[in-house]
Structures are given as C-alpha cells and as structure tokens.
Image (spheres, rainbow, N blue to C red):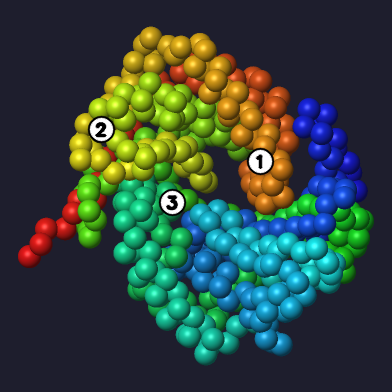
Amino acid sequence: MKQNFYQRIGELVHQETLPNGLEIRVVPKPGYAKKYAFFATRYGGMDTRFQHDGQWLDTPAGIAHYLEHKMFDTEEGNALQELAKNGAEPNAFTSNAITAYYFDSTSKFEENLEILLKFVSIPYFTDESVAKEQGIIGQEIRMIEDNPDWQIYHQMLKALYQQNPAKTSIAGTIESISHITAGTLYDCHKAFYTPSNMILTVVGDVEPAAVSELAQRVLPRSGGPVIARDYGQEPEAVAERENQIAMEVSSPQFLSAFKCRPPERGEDTLRTMILGDIACDLLLGESSPLYQRLYSQGLINGTFGGAFELLPGAAYLYAGGDSKETRTVAEEILKEAGRLVREGADESFYQRVRRASYGFNIRALNSFENIAASMTDGHFNGYDPFRFPEVFDSINLDDVLDFLRKNITEDRSVFCEIVPKEET
C-alpha cells in the first residue's frame, strides 16, 4: 500500500486502489483500543436519475434511503444483530450524495469487518420484507414532516433550487416510496454498490495489509461501470424568493438563505468549503458584530445560527432561528454582508475567526468518525482532506470578502418562514 505522511498534522495514511476499483484508506492510530470502519458508496438521495446499461433511468425519490434500511437483511437474519453480538456498534446513514455503513469495536475487528463487507455487497430482499418496510419508512416520513426544523429546511431547498435534486427529500414521500419494489432495489444495488463506486476507510490500531487482503477476499472481483448521473441544468436564479407555511409552533421561525456558486470538482471543493465556513462565521457567528447587535436588540435568541453547505452541483449559506421580527433579521443579514464588502472587516476579528476555524478543523482529527467521513468526501469529490493546512494558508481576507460579494446578494437570497397556526 502507498503511504503518505502529512507533516503539518502528523498523520499517516495508507492508500490503495484494488484491482476491482475499490479505494482503501487506512489511518493508523497506534495504542488506541477503538477501531472504526466506514464503508461508503457514492449514492445518495439526489441520485434518482442515472444511466445504466446505456439507458437513462428514473427511480422513485427516497430509494437510496430505502435501500440502506433493507441492506441489513441477510439470508441468515440481520447483520445489525450479528455485529452487536460481536461487541460492535454498527449503524448507517443516507445523505444527499452518499450512503455509508459503519461500526466501531475494540475486539473481533476483522471478523466484524468481514460481516460489514459481506452484507453491504450481497443484497437480500423479498417482496414481503420490502412491503413491510414501506410502513416503517412511511411512519418515519410522517414524523419528519411534522418537525418544524426539517420542514423549514426543506422549504428553503425548494426555494433555492429549480432543477437540482437537492430540493428532494432524502426519505422521499409516502407516494414515491409506494413504487419501490424488491426489483428496483436490486437494480439500484447492482448499479451503485460496486467496488469502483465505493471506498473503505479504517481508522485505528490495525494492520493495513490485513484490511486490504480481507477486502480482496470478500468483495467481488469486478468493479462495475462508471455511473453517469443527471442533476439537471440548474440556472443561476433561485426558484422562488420566499415561502411561508403555518404549523404548530409557539413563535415564528425563519431561514434566510443564499444560492452560492458551486465549486469545481477537486481541490477547489476543499477551498470553497473553507471559504464558506469562514465567511459564515465572519458574517453571523456568535462573536460577530451582527450577532451581538441583533441579540442585544432582542431580535434573535440562542436558536439563531447558520452554516455553509456543499452538495453535488449546489452550494448555499443559510441562517435562521426563532424571532418575532423574522424579516427584519433577514434584511439585517443582507445589509451586514454589503457593509463588509464595502468597508472590510476588522483585522483582529478576522484573525480570531480564522484561528477558530483552523483549530476546529484540526481538533476534528481527534475523531475517528470525522476522519473517515472527510476521507470519503475527499475521494468522491477529488480532493485530499489532509491537505487542509496548505489550502487554508492560501486564503486571505480579500478572498472571504470576494466570496460574500459574489454570493450573499439580494438576487441570490430566499426567505422562508413558519408561522404559528391560527386557532379555528
């Protein structure tokens, strides 16, 4: 296996591409009892339209998430129970862009890793179990649709995007999942759960060669074709400037969001992530002038916050929370962005934000989970996450202000609000 040592962060990574196309990353942690395995496919909630065997296929919204639920079924029983009996703590998730299966354990690691690789690569579905799962996932969908935080976030994405499937719920809808059968699950597994579309990351006190040998023994020899995906031709303009819904909430809740220009694949992705995070903290972080002013005026409270997010073909910065003056707060965010672009930021404050951002990312290396997730995202998007210090050093205040100037503008903004439902 190839070895890369990153001097500035003191991390060693063993890397290998198997003959079947599977990427393997092993990050040694000598002396640690915990071992962590993360097995991910580049297949998420956005991948509803793709090309396979020369044909474009449209699949129901929510199918990647549905498939994740069913993957733990095996002909012998349930892989979750099998891993738990071995002392492992397993789980899985589906995001917009990936589906991942993982576990941590302090003993029987190789035995647990073999179980993980087998059940993810060998599907077992029956019409009866798939039909039963519709009720379980349907109940999950109803629960999240009743959640104001989820509802306003979903409304925000629908306002931002006209074509990009980022606006589609990862879980789908009650109607969309009703079209999912064992056959469609097998088809999607065959398309996306191939070694060349996946990455295995292991963090802990393990022997890298043993991980590679086990993966080669357990997984299919062939890697599978490259899958073309269609995320639509997204225009610059937002889908709608604002929307409002009524729910059972005690006070109005809002999100103000900005449709940012997505980065190119490769290291530009890492650079844009850093830029967006710093810009977000500079504009509306808890120590920012805007936050302090709005908080002192009683316009926001502890629920207020924001973030910058990247998805395939999409990028957005958003902020919100509870407020009795939701539109006023949204207007103030836009005004503050304009002020920063015109007048610049206080240098000492910028340096504090910069140091805090750098420190946060370095501390994340203490987390096995964060290491594995960043390795996965980096592989699927063509960048090396452990080059963070070098990319971070290339960014200055002018770059951050230029990000605000290009992206945090009125024509790129949307305003979404949940108001208390009136009593009838």
Q: How many marks?
A: 3
Farthest bottom residue? 128
Q: Residue 221 in the image: x percent, y percent?
A: 82, 67
For marks 2 and 3, give the one nearer the viewer.
2
Q: Alpha-carbon distance for marks 2 and 3? A: 34 Å
Q: Position of residue 399 (x, y in %)?
A: 52, 18
Task: Kindly state the secondary structure of the residue where label 3 is placed.
Answer: helix
Most foreground residue, 179 or 343: 343
Dot label at residue 166: 3
Q: Mark 2 highlights which residue?
A: 298
Q: What residue appears at the point 73 percent right and 74 percent down from the top-left corner?
A: 83
Residue 281 drawn at (x, y percent) = 47, 28
Picture disc at residue 364? 1
Q: Is residue 204 above or below residue 263?
A: below
**SS class of the residue under badge 2?**
loop
Q: Earlier in the sequence, mark 2 or mark 3?
A: 3
